[in-house]
Amino acid sequence: MKRVVEFKGVHRSYQRDVPVLDGISFAVDAGEVIGLLGKNGAGKTTLLYIAMGMLEVQDGQALVFGLNPRRDVVEVKRRVGFVSEDQALPGFFTANQVMDVHRGLFPTWEEDMARDLMRRFELPAERRVGKMSKGQARQLALLCAVAHRPELLILDEPAGGLDPHARREFLETSIRLLNETGTTILFSSHHMNDVERMASRLLMLHEGQIWIDSELDEIREGYCLALLPAGMSRARENLLAQPRCLCVRERTDAVRAVFEMGAEDCRAHLAQELGLDVVNCRPLPLEEMFIELVGGTS
Amino acid sequence: MRSLIARNAALRTAPMWMLVMLVGAQVLTGIYGYRVAKGAEMTNTTLLVGAWLMIAIYLTWGQVKHRCSRFDLALPLPARTLWTSSLIGSSLAVALMVATILAVVAAIFALAESLEGFDALRAGEMARVGSILLAAALCGVAWRQGRNPELASAPGGLRHASLVLAGLLALLVPMILLQDRPLLLVPFLLAVAALLAMSARRGIPPGYVLSPLATSGGAAAERSGPDAIRARPARGLRGVWLIYMMIVRSAPKGPALLLLATPFLLLFGALLSGLLQQLVSDTDLRFAYLPMTAYIALAFVAPPLANLRAVDVLPLGRRRLLLLLTLPPLVIIAAGYLGGVVWLGARDFEMPRIVYVEEGGNYGLRVPQFMWRMAWDGDAPPAVAPWGESHPVMTIPVIEGAPPVIYKPYTTPEGASRDFVAWQIWRAAGASFGTDLTREEIAERYLWTDLDDRVRLKEEGLELPGPGWEVVDSSPGPFLPVSLALVAVLLYVGVAIYAPGVRAGVSRVRRNVRMWTLLGMLLLMHMAPYVLALKGVSRPWVLEAAGVDVMLKLARAVPGGIVGVWIAAFVVGAVFFEIAATAFRRVESPVAPDTCLWNNLDKGD
């Protein structure tokens, strides 16, 4: 399988001793659709910007198509499409002019695809970007990002601020359009539904590290939430001492722990290790897992 | 209220506009000096009109139209309170502009008066001009703030701007007609300002709105879909132009910066051509404008350099981006230079280059400063005629107390023979513009020796070139390539120092401090010759002459003549471009969109 993105021990911080990415390592192969999750400030945008060559790594190595995106700028960016939530499309250009710039810079630009998307999005070609609605501007950005058939599509919160209908159409269009042709997609989102619907693999960033790097199916089956009655002595310490316990949260009604194992295995494991006969273990929806993980004590 | 005034857009952008006024005021004093040198009557109309033009530009395109930010709109404050704070803030800002212009003009006039005996405007007249300008500016602020009082920001489109500018220029009529009666004019203008302000205040609704109600259905007629696509791939010049526009206009205030910088770059290009000196005096100070030219170029390049988000996602190499950023200002400067040369040529106007004139009872040969030479060790060679007559030459120290001197190889000291003087005139004319006359013909035609053995003119004053003197070569040297190379060096050094500040981990404050320090250093470089002159350490024209001699010697050392000099200038520029490109390669797009270099007004607006 062809390797598209490879991060090896990437470190990046904006302030001394406050790492945003602290030795991140992962690899993305061709054709994968990777959902990037993490709370605000987790480093998702930093990671994507590094992949785009818009930020430097301070330590480690980031490779895209085996190239250094900071050094081989043109070679990398010609093969990448990029859309971000706050994408700075020139507001004073018409849609036609924006597309003209992209036509001139991307040798692989497909006019038929651009026209097809213009029709689908009903974009006004002669309207200035600044006069477009947020959804239209984002659709134009997507059009420009995909009409040159990129080998890698990077989407940084691309549907942020869009209404549910526009968001779904945006994501489905881009992902269906490109994934059918084997394009690799790396996208970040706060919408768990989007991630669950689109991604084949999930990367969860937390405190500068990758907490979860798994196929989505494995996450659905391989993680569970264990609920223990409140008031148990040393519950937190005991749970955290268990292997594959990712985090523990103490609430007034219960102690909640996320385990990297199936619900049945977890129940059996806790019964054996802690002598707990009745433990409520259940599979964990992605959104709930996200909340438990980023809010719990690791 | 104080907090609102402190956040006022006009006040926050005042430092940038004060710099514009500073440069504009220098140009204004140059024009004023030119008119005086041409024998125009000493009135303050030129000053009044010039200063008001600058103020009118500020009132039209400055932040005076802003009444509040979106943040202010969300506060539980009535629109009238916001409007009042905006009126006060804008009035303070415009007062700062007037003060800047007058301070610069007064300082330059004082310097000119002390150095050259220039009979400048008296302090009383300056105060009169200042009071008229201030009253008129307050009138302009009240009018600007009174337009469409229901909006959070007065309209600023081209149509509105033209109207505002026309109205402000119309104010010149009473200002010029009644300038000699300030006791009538100033209260009149203040009364008009008060009336406008009161009238506007009455029209302010309880709350501002962000935009007027739409009146046309033009958007509905827009075509959409694939049929509306006009596929014209942006390649070649159009591609370069579109990408350049993306870069420049992506910076906050980019279009305004382009509009502001272009005329100044053209102007400084023209000044580098020696335009002002040729028109006003024979003292050539064009190298003194190099730092200010680089200042304008750097101030123009820096904001887009810090806002590359729009283009950073495109497959454009960093060297190409840097070239796109920095080449246009250099081209505009070159265009200004050529414009200056063409304008001078079209006017067929030239100051006399060589003058043999009586000064203090002795005749002396005055030559342009580019004909002075420099002796680093202070040991100037004597002038030796072919028949052996030898005289020491005139020397002036470049810096008082230091060895280097500039000397005039064409010195005609007291006691020199008629043939020696003729020989020097012949040499100087030949070096400056070429001549077919021999020294014998010059001696015969122009010179005689009086009873005291002093060489004198047959007729009063010999100015060359004159009738019968054919100008063969009027170029004083390869100033254009050298000037462009020096501006490029300063610009690229500036970029190399500024670029490391444009990184995701560097705060905007630190980046701006870096920028302003750089600009401040260029400003100091510009002012240094004048400060040295005030301290009696050196004289601007002496420093210029020394610099020109170094340049000419270097140019002569380059093989290939003018083509060789152009190639050398290109190589120097390319070397410093590479230095800047190395630093520019590490520039990072900010993770959050950046706002204006000088203010934070765009955030959320």
Image (cartoon, helix red, strand yellow):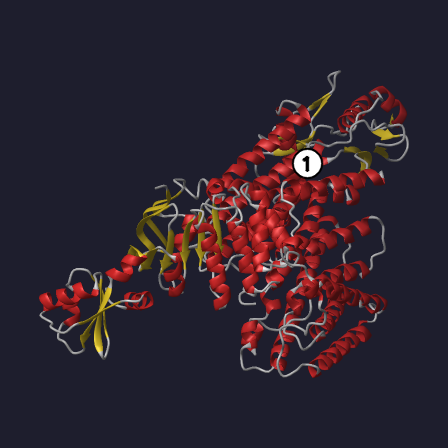
Q: Position of residue B162 (x, y in %)?
A: 76, 63
Name the residue rendered at 78%, 45% in the picture. B280
Q: Position of residue A284 (x, y in %)?
A: 27, 67
Which quarter of the picture shows residue A156? bottom left
Q: Position of residue B219 (x, y in %)?
A: 68, 65
Q: Which residue is mark 1?
A: B480
Name the residue rendered at 53%, 40% in the picture. B319
User: Which residue is at the front of the view, B65 or B159?
Assistant: B159
Callout 1: few (<14), some (14-19), or many (20+) C-alpha neighbours within 10 Å? some
Image side of residue B435 versus residue B338, left or right: right
Eyeballing the image, is B566 above or below B170?
A: above
Q: Quadrant of the N terminus of chain A?
A: top left
Q: How many marks?
A: 1
Which quarter of the picture shows residue A279? bottom left
Q: Quadrant of the C terminus of chain A?
A: bottom left
Amino acid at the residue labelled 1: Leu
Image side of residue A165 versus residue A67, left or right: right
Name the residue rendered at 47%, 68% in the picture. A164
User: Which residue is at the front of the view, B209 or B482?
Assistant: B209
Dot 1: what SS? Answer: helix
Q: Position of residue B173 (x, y in %)?
A: 84, 67
**Residue at mark 1: chain:** B
Is residue B63 visible in this depiction of the protein? yes
User: Which residue is at the front of the view, B63 or B124?
Assistant: B63
